[in-house]
Image (cartoon, helix red, strand yellow):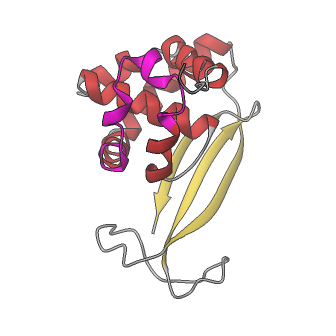
Amino acid sequence: LGEALVLGPVYVGVHLWGRLRLNEILRECGFSHRRRRLACMEVVSRLVAPASELATGAWVRRTALGLLTGERVTSVNKDALYHTSDALWAKHEAIESALAGRERGLFALDECFILYDLTSTYFEGHAASNPKAKRGHSRDHRGDCKQVVVGMVLDEAGFPKASEVYS
């Protein structure tokens, strides 16, 4: 007998991934079959147990995500997850747009925006490859670090509708 795997919450996440037809959306965005499986693993892990890419790779191996997606969990590591995050971000506008229509149909939601929120996050390190990362007033009292501002629009049910990252 092996170690027990986390199943319940990851099963729900993978099921919702399918209901939203995210594989179809990502295929239309040019994602390979493997990249779509990694994206599913990454998104579900963020929903169930948010953590860094390094911690996510280890967490995935303790779940049934490999069995549910068909991806070998030994190939899920921080580098694969970083590349997947970058690919998702590069196509985030197309993904968000496609998801908005699917979400309305799946949950029968009225189009109503009620909240626009801004928050900031800072980077430890140089953040040299992120042109939006700048120094400025830090509510986190980390004036020594570069930061970005994240804006998000939510509807009345609390579903995210759009997001943007600002300098």
* Residue occupying the far bottom of the picture: 144
**Residue 15 placement, left or right of 129:** right
Question: Residue 105, percent across and down?
Answer: 59, 11
**Please, is residue 106 above or below residue 4 in the view?**
above
User: Observer-nearest residue: 100 or 44?
Assistant: 44
Residue 138 seen? yes
* Residue 143: quadrant of the picture: bottom right
Quadrant including the N terminus: top right
Residue in view at x 46 percent, y 36 percent: 42
Please determine whether, in this image, residue 85 is positioned above or below residue 32.
Answer: below
| 64 magenta-colored | yes
Residue 26 located within the stretch drawn in magenta: no
Specify the quadrant that holds the C terminus.
bottom left
The number of numbered discs placed on residues in the rendered structure image is 0
Across and down, in percent, residue 15 comes to 56, 14
Q: Is residue 87 above or below residue 124?
A: above
144 relative to 158 in the view: left or right? left
Across and down, in percent, residue 144 comes to 51, 88
Viewer-closest of 12 and 151? 12
Residue 145 in picture, x, y percent from top left: 49, 81
Apparent side of residue 3 relative to residue 37 in the rendered image (left or right): right
Residue drawn at x 52%, y 40% as measured from the top left: 59
Which region shows up in magenta? 60-81
